[in-house]
Amino acid sequence: MSKSTAYGSVLKINTGSLTLVAAVEEVAYPVTSQVIEEVTTHDSTGGYYEAIAVGVFRAEPFDVVLVWDESLATHAQFRTSFDAATAVGFSMEDPGGAEVMSFNGLVESIARMTPLKGALRARVRIHPTGAATIA
């Protein structure tokens, strides 16, 4: 595995086509997980916990911090998707372009942050829905 920095990570949102989100300060890939069900019974060997994977997978919600400017088309799309309560397409790409994750997501929240000094920012929570593809 080659080494790379997070600087240069790419987040895109569908504004009619996948478009690079402007002014991203922080973003991380959503954690992918599967549902694990406990099945420990009285006859479990040595009384140890037992579990099974039930075949349900998910990409967990994650946050993106933006220098917020709703006049930018990509920032306006977050607001439009939030107001419409509909999923929108996203893709995330590592700095080297080795891995791209594509998924639909709901804009769960937009938290505007107004520091005493500095630019207006927003922490946007994206809640993936459906299957994510990683290529």
Image: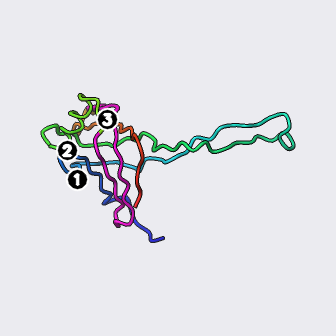
Tell me the residue at 24%/28% (across/down): 83
- Mark toward the start of the polypeptide (3 vs 1): 1
User: In the image as oriented, which residue stretches furthest toward the bottom?
Assistant: 2
**Could you tell me how far apart the alpha carbons at marks 3 and 2 are, in whole angstroms?**
13 Å
Q: Is residue 41 left or right of residue 22?
A: right
Q: Which residue lies under the disc numbered 2?
A: 74
Q: Is residue 117 left or right of residue 131?
A: left
Task: Confirm or deny contact between disc 1 and disc 2 (CB under 8 A).
Answer: yes
- Mark toward the start of the polypeptide (1 vs 2): 1
Tell me the residue at 73%/37% (across/down): 39
Q: What amino acid is at disc 1?
A: Leu
Quadrant of the image occupied by residue 52:
top right
- Mark toward the start of the polypeptide (3 vs 2): 2
Q: How packed is label 2: few (under 14 Cα within 10 Å), some, or many (20 or more)?
A: many
Does dot 3 land on a helix, a strand or a loop?
strand
Q: Which residues are magenta?
A: 88-114
Tell me the residue at 86%/38% (across/down): 43
Which residue occupies the foreground of this view, 22 or 32? 32
- The image shows residue 89 at horizontal and vertical percentages of 29, 45
Q: Which residue lies under the disc numbered 3?
A: 107
Q: Which residue lies under the disc numbered 1?
A: 20
Q: Is residue 67 above or below residue 42?
A: below
Quadrant of the image occupied by residue 49:
top right
Quadrant of the image occupied by residue 36:
top right
User: In the image as oriented, which residue stretches furthest toward the front?
Assistant: 55
**Is 67 inside the magenta-drawn segment?**
no
Secondary structure mostly seen in the magenta stretch:
strand
Q: What amino acid is at disc 3?
A: Val
- The image shows residue 56 at horizontal and vertical percentages of 54, 42
Q: How packed is label 1: few (under 14 Cα within 10 Å), some, or many (20 or more)?
A: some
